[in-house]
Image: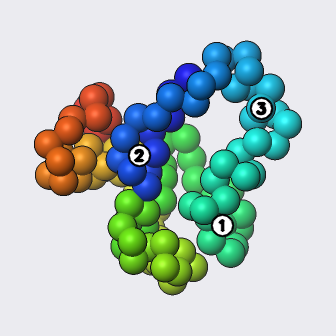
Amino acid sequence: MVYFAPDSLRWDATGAGYGAWLSWLLAGGAEEFYEGLRWPGWREEVPGLTGGEGLSLYPPLWSAEAHQDLAATSRAVVPLGQLLGFARDTALQLDGTDPGFLGEA
């Protein structure tokens, strides 16, 4: 299993196969995994999102400014394709690395 990290704009291997990843997820592993990427009140913000939407944060999660105070980031609901396209374009601009299919229609 791989994971596209919004704080590094890179694909990271989880070191687990699908079965182990699913067991980890069902056992609550995501709580600790995402701890540094969540802000107070995130649970109230995300239930209204559809499968085709995501939250755009400013400053973005890959910036040092966002991690200084995640609660202070501005957040907006955007189409998932737009969010992934922004991540892909940013990765290309920052270090020339194309993360792959992200944002492609």
**Quadrant in which residue 104 is drawn:** top left
Q: Do we see residue 97 in this rendering?
A: yes
Residue where numbered disc 2 is placed: 80
10 Å neighbourhood of mark 1: few (<14), some, or many (≥20)?
A: few
Identified at 64% across, 22% down, the residue is 16
Residue where numbered disc 1 is placed: 42
Q: CA distance from mark 1 to mark 2?
A: 18 Å
Residue where numbered disc 3 is placed: 24
Q: Position of residue 19 (x, y in %)?
A: 73, 16
Horizontal arrangement in the rendering, residue 2 relative to residue 40 (left or right): left
10 Å neighbourhood of mark 2: few (<14), some, or many (≥20)?
A: some
Identified at 60% across, 62% down, the residue is 36
User: Secondary structure beneath disc 1?
Assistant: helix
Q: CA distance from mark 3 to mark 2?
A: 25 Å
User: Secondary structure beneath disc 2?
Assistant: helix
Labels 1 and 2: the sequence-earlier one: 1
- Residue type pointed to by label 3: Trp
